[in-house]
Image: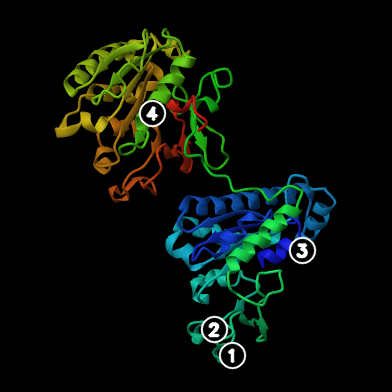
Amino acid sequence: MVLSIALTHSPSQVAVYGLDLVGGGLQALSGLPHVGGIAARTDAERVRRTVEEIHGMLEHRQEVFRERGIDSVQQLRRMHARGEVPELPCADIVLCVDGFGAVRNDFEEIDDTVSDLLRRGGGYGVHVVGAMLRWNDVRMTMQSNFGQKVELRLNDPSDSSVDRKLAETISAAAPGRALTGTKLFGQVALPRVDGTPDDENLGEVVEKASRAVAGAWRGPSAPSVRTLPYRLPARTLPGPEKEARRVPIGVDERALEPVLLDLFGGDQNLLVLGDGECGKTNLLRLVAEGLMARYDSSELVFAVMDPRRTLRNVIPEPYPGGYASNARVCAGLAGGVAKELDERMPDDADPDRLEDGEIAGPRIVVLADDYDVLTTAGQKPLAPFVPYVSNGRDIGLHFVVARRVAGAGRGLYDPLVQAMREIGTGAVLMSGDRSEGQLFPRVYANRQPPGRGRWIQRGGSPRLMQTALLDADGEDG
């Protein structure tokens, strides 16, 4: 079907995307200019991104239909052929899912999205073609969304949704023999254009045909599925000249736009969860570097809690307000800072000054790495900060805290972390073990590549992001 589309339509007419969830047979089509991407079962991230990208195209088409007064797919095709819809790179989009039953069983996170594509896509030129072992692989409520069905030989003829007795007559000796919804037999053609009636080496034949089609096409190809990079140099993010207040910490998966941390505004604090070698410390360094590039030492000071000494020498003079590398020294540093904060509390300050947003002294950023190490054996060295967390915006107190996912199911109820979460602190959940349970509403940890995490803000849905790497500044990434 895909090869026939490629031989009869241009990439500006039809774009094809594939989910290869069974044997890898669709990979031979990836060289066609009509194909924007084939996602294999083993690449769960690309599978999810393919579905999300097509769903985003559907949402965009819905707006285009409304703005241009398009009332049907046929009208869209005519207008697109005349060049009247330049915002759409192609008139029709086809999503091929080989192994449709695996969507529900193994990719539950995209099941609802695929269902929405089936329900609404046809009216906007987004089509879903599913190949499955039996009709029951499709939910009962979704079966009516398939306008056509073709049955090849079934392992169990009683599974036939057309006619069981006719299905019994299809022999394994006749590959490609099919039964249509109108109870007629048909024969599916081989995906080859060399005239040889042989099914040997079909993968190689399809790859050769794909290369020939690609070599003959001189126009633009189908839009590719966008995925996050595995290494993102920090120098590729906006600098202080473009973002004077907010600190870019990575790129968002959906739009591939910078993720901006507004520490002195809406976000106020940042909580980072992730197991070893996932990029927590790099993210803390990135935030610190970004803040120092945007604020001078009269506006900002750091109190660094660093039990593993991973942040040593990260904060240059004159920004350090204190450095502690064990629980005892951390408790002393926290107590000293708490005395300064006590003088800034609203009860002791001028109400008019608080209304103006003025803070008595520089903003204090508590940078705590490996917080789980500091709180072992029931220790709470940062407990002096807890009474001031809710007033942080008024008194200039902000926290950037990182800890392991292991034990986070209990660790999130630490008094300081709980106080941060209660005021709507933003969080980045990086690689971890799902067995820790639901760490945020409907959010579980899972294994991620280094630097990958989910950006979680109150009032918004979690977004996958790639954090930037400071040490990659001199590399191509």
Identified by mark 4, the residue type is: Asn
The image shows residue 75, relative to residue 231, as above or below, that is: below
Tell me whether the residue at label 1 lies in contact with that at label 2, contact meaning CB atoms closer than 8 angstroms: yes
Question: Residue 282, labelled with which disc?
Answer: 4
Considering the numbered disc 3 on the image, is that residue within a helix, a strand or a loop?
A: helix
Q: Earlier in the sequence, mark 1 or mark 4?
A: 1
- In this view, the residue farthest toward the left is 377
Tell me whether the residue at label 2 lies in contact with that at label 4, contact meaning CB atoms closer than 8 angstroms: no
Q: Calculate the distance from the C-alpha at mark 1 to the C-alpha at mark 4.
A: 64 Å
Considering the numbered disc 4 on the image, is that residue within a helix, a strand or a loop?
A: helix
- Residue 237 visible in the current orientation: no
Q: Residue at x 37, y 7 (%)?
A: 318
Of the two numbered discs 1 and 3 in the rendering, the one whose residue sits closer to the viewer: 3
Q: Calculate the distance from the C-alpha at mark 2 to the C-alpha at mark 3.
A: 32 Å
Question: Residue 160, labelled with which disc?
Answer: 2
The chosen color scheme is: rainbow
Q: Which residue is mark 1?
A: 166
Of the two numbered discs 2 and 4 in the rendering, the one whose residue sits closer to the viewer: 4
